[in-house]
Amino acid sequence: MALASEQIVCDYLVIGAGVAGLRAAITLAAHGRVLVLAKDTLHESASEYAQGGIAAALSDDDEVSLHEQDTLAAGDGLCDPEAVATLVKEGPNVIEELLEWGAAFDREDGELVFGREGAHSRNRILHAHGDSTGREISRTLYRRAAALSNVRFLSFAAVTDLLVENGEVRGAVAFDARYGERHPIFARAVLLATGGLGRVYKETTNPNVATGDGVAMAWRAGAVIRDIEFVQFHPTALHFDNAPRFLLSEALRGDGAFLRNAAGERFTDELASRDIVSRAIVREIAHTGSPHMFLDMTHFEPGVMEHHFPRIYQTCLRYGLDLTKTPAPVHPAAHYAMGGVHTNLDGLTTVPRLYAAGEVACTGVHGANRLASNSLLEGVVFGARAALSMLALEAASPSGGIPQTEVFPAMTESHLRSITWDHCGITRNEEGLAKAADILRSVPMEKRPAPTRQDYELRSMRRVALLIAMAALDRRESRGGHYRSDYPEKAKEAVHSTLQGTPL
């Protein structure tokens, strides 16, 4: 499907084609016309890159209550208990549904294989093809959605704004890069399933499309943004000068990989939560002067890397690294946003007719630090819940105007990403955060005669980076993924950050 007309009208607009958006589309399709938009190809999303797995209490020695306890512990006092209970209770049913729809999770002798990752007390992680779990779940959901006559897909449609009329969201504006044109799309309800914001950082495991567009659009529409300062940095991203920051899955450490310094010494608990391991690596880098640490799998049994982690193994081989013989150079990189657009348990934001699910949303499930492999589960669970809530809305008349006066930040993307990495990264302090906020707030804004997709993305990135800096500056404590060197202790009371309404 292409943007062939001046305007499009549908019943339900889903912005994003990852697992949250696809799962929502499947439920919505039985009740009206669904349009699913993807900024790039239909297969370029964070879901496609998710290696670690999907967590659910299904094994014989596991219980939902244990999954709940582990999630709450990782969230470091900031989880919404009701949201966590919803996630873990609905998790087993979600897995059964995916299996029924054809998801090929890894098995041995016909039985599902459950792995363990950092901060989990039981083996409860399901993988697909070793290290391609997100791709397999996306494939399963896409095949299911694409078979439904009411679902239409539109790729290379970058959404730049939400259409708001009388305080309600009535649709969105899609940018057609081929012709440099913007088109209104009207709907009775809009679901933001736009994924993450990792590209605001110089070092990230996220795909290039992860520019925080959903958070930026929701902010612009008046939605509350909550806990946006909590950004999770994955400890082990491949650190070659000539290679992308490819994720080396936590499942490797779950299977016994060691973290070593340049002298070959182990220096941390590999199965600690991601914030602890990331800070340990950064400290060791500072202590030793090495540009990175090393993830060692050379002691694995023959065939483990090739068969259990084929995607990781083959990717590293392309860069001349044989993981069966040589440890991988690794460095932390921005990986996942725990905060985002504030929603209730049914995905509804603080703006009527606007919903959010997946990484763009802040349901309260992750708190201050996401438990490994809960993200794919969250996307599927809350994508389905949001869809059910959207069905209750009555139709709205197509309305809302496209913004006519647009300005864009007069700065380079590399400059923005360096500011965020240097001052809003793994270790933060008041001086750096204040500097970042001042720079980002004072960036000159200018009109562009023919804006490109990159212009719109940079506009989103600047807004999101400033929100992170502002929230992190106000949080004078260290908790979960937010670490302040000038406030290293945790505050007695866990309080959510909320940002709304101030022009940026």
Image (cartoon, rainbow, N blue to C red):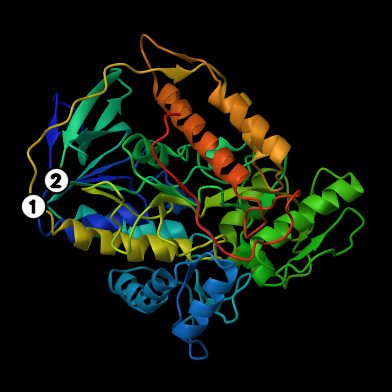
Q: Amino acid at mark 1?
A: Glu
- x%, y% of residue 392? 13, 59
Q: Residue at x 53, y 64 (%)?
A: 78
Element at label 2 = loop
Residue 394 tag number:
1
**Where residue 5 sits: x, y (%)?**
13, 25
Residue 489 lies in quadrant: bottom right
For marks 2 and 1 on the same chain, the one whose residue lies earlier in the sequence: 2
Q: Residue at x 63, y 43 (%)?
A: 245
- Which secondary structure lies at badge 1? loop
Decide: is 246 above or below 416.
below
Q: Residue lying farthest top? A: 449
Work out which quarter of the rendered image holds the N terminus and state it.
top left
Q: Amino acid at mark 2?
A: Arg
Out of 222 and 359, give the one closest to the viewer: 222
Q: Determine which of the numbered discs, if any, sits on residue 188 in the image.
A: 2
Q: Is residue 247 above or below residue 107?
A: above
Disc 2, disc 1: CB below 8 Å?
Answer: yes
Report whether 394 appears left or right of 146: left
Q: Mark 1 Cα within 10 Å, few/some/many (few <14, many 20+)?
A: few
| Whole-number angstrom distance, CA of label 2 to CA of label 1 | 7 Å
Please report the residue visible at 66 percent of the width from the left and 37 percent of the height from the top.
Answer: 433
Say which residue appears at 37% left-offset and 51% top-offset.
18
Hey, which quadrant is residue 252 in on the image? Answer: bottom right
Q: Position of residue 491 (x, y in %)?
A: 65, 61
